[in-house]
Image: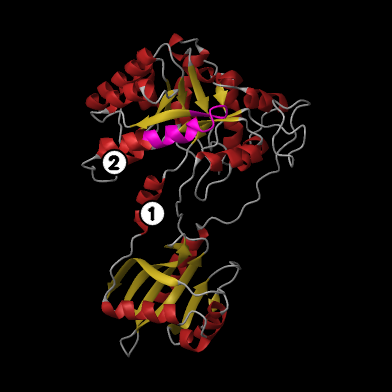
Amino acid sequence: MTRFVLTCMLLLCCSCVPTPSTAPAAARGASKAPWAPSDPSLPHDFLAPIVDHHQHLLSPALATLWNEKLTAASLPPDVAELVVALEGSWNNEGMLAELYEEDSVLMAPPSWEYLTHGRAAIAARLAHLFRASYKLAPASVHTDGAAGYLVLYLERPRGGVELPFAEALLMIQRDGDHKWRVATEALRVPGPEVYSAFEAKDLLTLLDQAGIRRAVVLSAAYAWSDKGHAPWPDEYARVRAENDWSAQQVAQFPARLVAFCGISPIRDYALEEVRRCASELHARGVKMHFSNSGVELANPEHLRAVQAVFAEANRLKLALVVHLQTEKVAYGAADAQIFLNEVLPKAPDIVVQIAHMAGSGPGWNDEAFEVYADAVGKGDPRTARLYFDVATCAEEQSYSRLVRLAQRIRQVGINRILYGSDASFGNRATPRQEWATFQGYVPLSQAELAAIASNVAPYLSN
């Protein structure tokens, strides 16, 4: 029974592993594209968005911070002995076989359709799976008597640093000789997302591949005030440096890229940084990420802080891009009503762009979006300069949800919908793939798709 439960756990784990998907080919555009594509591989009539309104770069500092999540776990000496043996036996069938139980089970690429049973068959498969050696870095471990689990990263050097290219979940157990052996293993390739710096020149390459002329670069400086990380003693200095780096990158390509600063609105330096972004960095706007920053509009203190940022941005004529969804389970209409009634009126003269159609992507939050759609439909003056970007809204959605998405887009009006991909660094889809997903999956007409592709936020025409 124990072995059956362990195997089922692994099957469940691996069923969640992303598998390569075939994105729909980009649909042909209208008779005339919004602009001539710069990539000669694109058809002359390729329908491409003029602007990607939701893009990011990644600084070396943030890449290092995010990769720190891959730190190694400390192993008990007897488990460490097993890991050392596995690493040293990577291409040796005989040695590998001794490290697995007689009736062990393996699930590994490239064929997920079947399990490999038995130590001999597993050793034969694993010994020929990788053409070069690797190091095993333990990420997590737990043992309880004669059983336990172990999560390992398979690492190789990249740019002078050992980084994971695969990961494995092992169920381990002791035999009569008291040595740990592998009872069940699930191997995943690729492994965890590894980050490296993503600069403006890299973004331009992806934009050209998609036929996209311009992009709005949203600084991720708010990541330095992430609610999941202990406060940095020099947090504001880090936020400033991040916004500076992003602005400097964008400044290299002023005809193609536009810079927005990033802040947490509930930090005591928020207003100072908004002013600096306008006067010193000449940013076009400010990006806020409520979930990342731990913002809850139902919290009176948070609400006052957000209102102050909106009012200051309005005074300085800085556009705002806001990721409104938070991590609370009940996020929805009540939060949208607070934003509509208490926050939006503080910025009547500037564009407010709600990211991910009031969700967080993939998909969108329909309950929250309905509040804004109803207000727009009633001609509510507070929504006069309200726009929505569709970054990742079409990803991983059922057909009925995609139909609903098209209905919501029509409800607020095509003219309020801004294309954005939120796609660049790491293992994300490219801007071209995101646009192919959106126009291939969302049941809009070619005329409607062409209109969205042609939409340009008013803050870009100033």
Q: Which residues are magenta?
A: 243-258
Crowding near pointer 1: few (<14 within 10 Å), some, many (20+)? some
Amino acid under disc 1 = Asn
Q: Is residue 290 left or right of residue 367?
A: left
Give x and y (percent) for residue 123.
52, 82
Q: Is residue 300 magenta?
A: no
Q: Is residue 376 above or below residue 353?
A: above
Give x and y (percent) for residue 354.
46, 26
- Nearer the observer: mark 1 or 2; the answer is 1
Q: Is residue 203 above or below residue 127?
A: above
Residue under the image location 39 percent in, 18 percent down: 340
Distance, label 1 to label 2, CA atoms, is 17 Å
Quarter holding residue 35: top right
Q: Is residue 94 above or below residue 344?
A: below
Residue under the image location 41 percent in, 78 percent down: 182
Residue under the image location 41 percent in, 11 percent down: 348
Label 2's element?
A: loop
- Mark sitting earlier along the chain (1/2): 1
Q: Is residue 211 left or right of residue 73?
A: right
Residue 158 visible? The answer is yes
Q: Which residue is mark 2?
A: 227
Residue under the image location 35 percent in, 55 percent down: 69
Q: Quadrant of the image for the N terminus? A: bottom left
Crowding near pointer 2: few (<14 within 10 Å), some, many (20+)? some
Amino acid under disc 2 = Lys
Q: Nearer the viewer, residue 250 or 231?
A: 250
Q: Is residue 210 left or right of residue 378?
A: right
Q: Nearer the viewer, residue 60 or 329?
A: 60
Q: Which residue is mark 1?
A: 67
Label 1's element?
A: helix
